[in-house]
Amino acid sequence: MNFDSTAIVWYAAICGILAAFAPQIGGRVVRLTIGAVVGIVAASVLPIIKGIMGY
């Protein structure tokens, strides 16, 4: 089985940053919405970053 370690590290960093601020963000629906938006942005940016890095 082949794992993409770049994706694992990327999402770990994004989720860690989001979790650090989560209690201060607001209610459950607001956190869910922000989490979804951050996930979409992170998934959209990762291929660009991998391209720049030459992966």
Image (cartoon, helix red, strand yellow):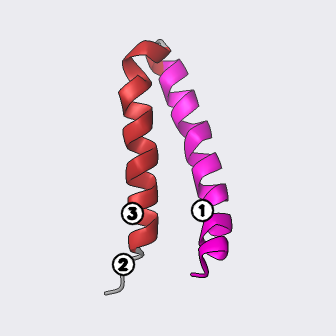
Mark 3 falls on what kind of element? helix
Q: Which mark is first along the chain, 1 or 2?
A: 2
Give, as a three-letter code, the residue at label 2.
Answer: Phe
Q: Main secondary structure of the magenta part?
A: helix
Badge 1, how many Cα within 10 Å: few under 14, some, many 20+?
Answer: some
Q: Kindly indicate whether the residue at mark 1 contacts the one at mark 2 (C-beta within 8 angstroms).
A: no
Above or below: residue 28 compared with residue 18: above
Residue labelled with disc 1: 46
Q: Kindly indicate whether the residue at mark 3 contacts the one at mark 2 (C-beta within 8 angstroms).
A: yes
Q: Which mark is residue 8?
A: 3
Asked which quadrant contains residue 52, the reply is bottom right
Asked which quadrant contains residue 44, the reply is bottom right
Q: Which residues are magenta?
A: 29-55
Q: Which mark is first along the chain, 1 or 3?
A: 3
Quadrant of the snapshot with the C terminus:
bottom right
Residue 12, position in %: x, y?
A: 37, 52
Residue labelled with disc 2: 3
Above or below: residue 43 compared with residue 5: above
Q: Is residue 4 magenta?
A: no
Mark 1 falls on what kind of element? helix
Tell me the distance, in whole angstroms, between the alpha carbons under discs 2 and 3.
Answer: 8 Å
Mark 2 falls on what kind of element? loop
Give, as a three-letter code, the residue at label 3.
Answer: Ile
Q: Which mark is first along the chain, 3 or 2?
A: 2
Give, as a three-letter code, the residue at label 1.
Answer: Leu
The residue most toward the bottom is 1
Would you say 38 lies left or right of 9 here?
A: right
The residue lying at 62 percent from left, 48 percent from top is 40
Badge 2, how many Cα within 10 Å: few under 14, some, many 20+?
Answer: few
